[in-house]
Image (spheres, grey):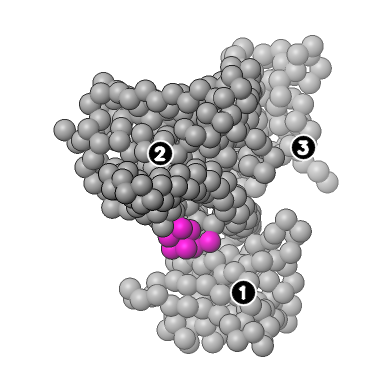
Amino acid sequence: MARPLKTNCWELKDCGYGPKSAEPCPAATDATSHGTNRGINAGRICWTVPGTLCDGFVQGTFHEKQPLCLSCGFIEQVRREEGEGFRFLKLARGVSDPQSLRAKLGQVEALEAIHEELSSRFDLDRVLADITQEVERATHAQRSLVLLRQPDPSGEGPAQLRGRFALRRKEVSVAIPIDDTSAVGCAALNNVSVNVRDPYNPRRRKPADPPFSKRFDRACRCRTRALLAVPIRDAEDQAVGVITAVNSDKGYFSQDDQWFLEHFAVEASLALEKDALLKVSLSTMRLASIGETVAALSHCIKNIAHTLRGSSYIIKRGLERNRIEDVRSAWELLDRHVELLADLVSDVLAEPVGLPARVDAFVVADLNETVRNAVRLFEAEARARAVDLVLKRGRGLRRCRFSKRGVYRAVVNLVVNALESVPHSGGQVVVATRKKRSGEAVISVSDSGSGMDERTRQALLRGLLDPRKTRGTGLGLVTVRSIVERHRGHVTIESKPGKGSCFSIYLPAPTT
């Protein structure tokens, strides 16, 4: 016989926000909680429902409500009336005092902390290490371990579960078969959670209990008193690994512990998915970088070739007419551009395929001179296109610390992009340098092209835009960003549709 329903929060407080009111409280309409603590809907577990109308005000989230709810006498009344059957959360039982209440809150907050880590900076090994650390804290386990499904190194045997952990300050590698001879292997094989209690006690073992292998204990010189193993599933709900918790300080792992571990397994799955997406993204960026390098080199080589042909013609004429001065000046120009061509070729050959351009050692030099040399490459092409190519050099940049090769390549990529953006005959590209009051050096490349909308601009800044589908909207930006980041600087983009674009490179303060 079901226990009778008890007083709900809206009845005790007489707030007028019950289920039949014109504006019912969210706690009065949460049918998923009906019956919890013998209440109607969430009437006796209202502290878990966000946005309730306590005291006539809309309350916040579960954690934001915590101080108010802990001081409310209604929780204490429900706790007394329900006794051992009291439930603070839908997932938890036995929360009977502020200490155990805060312990449950700490477990939930640990899950949120891992999710925040996934949403911000990301390193797979670090996130998995954080997950196991929080599992140990949330379940009071002696150790937690993530084992991932990996092919046999020999390529001949079946896949195994592999992981690493520290034992007496040494890193130990673990390989567990995916079969029904062990609890961990069984969890991966059958894609189910496995909870083992006191496996060394034959009186506690039953035929229906999950399997347990003592080989791991012998290898690590330990004794397992309790083991919880939960599968880590991919987007297709297939087990790609297992997360474990070993030896709870209370002697066993409860259903609440299993609930938390299953949710930590979800976070581990998200971490694996994100790592896979980042690897795909890196491959895409490398392919994009190949296209960017080829595009930039084609412009550079074409302009260098014009200079080489012109210099060669002057040298031949000078020799025919015995004009040594013409030969000498033309030879210096020829020699300089041959060296430049050799540098460009070595950039491609020396780099791993598709990676951003190599940056040489930093030197103290005139930033304006390097920018001017890059712009000179495009003067002939700009004249042929009837594009106004303007260089504006700022002051205070004669002693900057930077990589000549790196900055040269970055400016070349941005000028290539700008020339592609502007219309032939009448377009304008302005390359400008300046020194900010903060000491930063700024190199900007502006164009009078068609510009871009805010969504495109943001996509370029995040590196999400496919350069194969764009023209004059960031080609070469992957290379530029890589070079600038090595200088500990940053790149900005200003643009509006129909108003052109301005790509700016910010470098740290020049050396004085």
Q: Is residue 159 left or right of residue 443?
A: right
The image quadrant that residue 209 belongs to is bottom right
Given residues 144 and 381, the one toward you in this image is: 381
Marks 3 and 2: which is nearer the front?
2
Q: Amino acid at mark 3?
A: Thr
> What is the span of residues highlighted in magenta in the rendered image?
345-353
Q: Nearer the viewer, residue 511 or 95?
A: 511
- The residue indicated by pointer 2 is 374
The residue that disc 1 covers is 150
Element carrying mark 2 = helix
Q: Are marks 2 and 1 in contact (CB under 8 Å)?
A: no
* Residue depicted at 77% across the width and 37% down the height: 32
Q: Quadrant of residue 150?
A: bottom right
According to the image, label 3 marks what residue?
Answer: 32
Q: Amino acid at mark 2?
A: Ala
Q: Give yes or no for contact between labels 1 and 3 (Cβ–Cβ under 8 Å).
A: no
The rendered magenta stretch, by its main secondary structure, is classed as helix
The answer to whether residue 320 of the structure is visible from this angle is yes
Q: Is residue 241 above or below residue 485?
A: below
Q: Residues within 10 Å of mark 1 (few under 14, many from 20)?
A: some
Which mark sits nearer the N-terminus, 3 or 2? 3
Nearer the camera: disc 2 or disc 1:
2
Q: Residue at x 70, y 66 (%)?
A: 239
Provide residue 431's location: percent of width, then percent of height: 43, 27
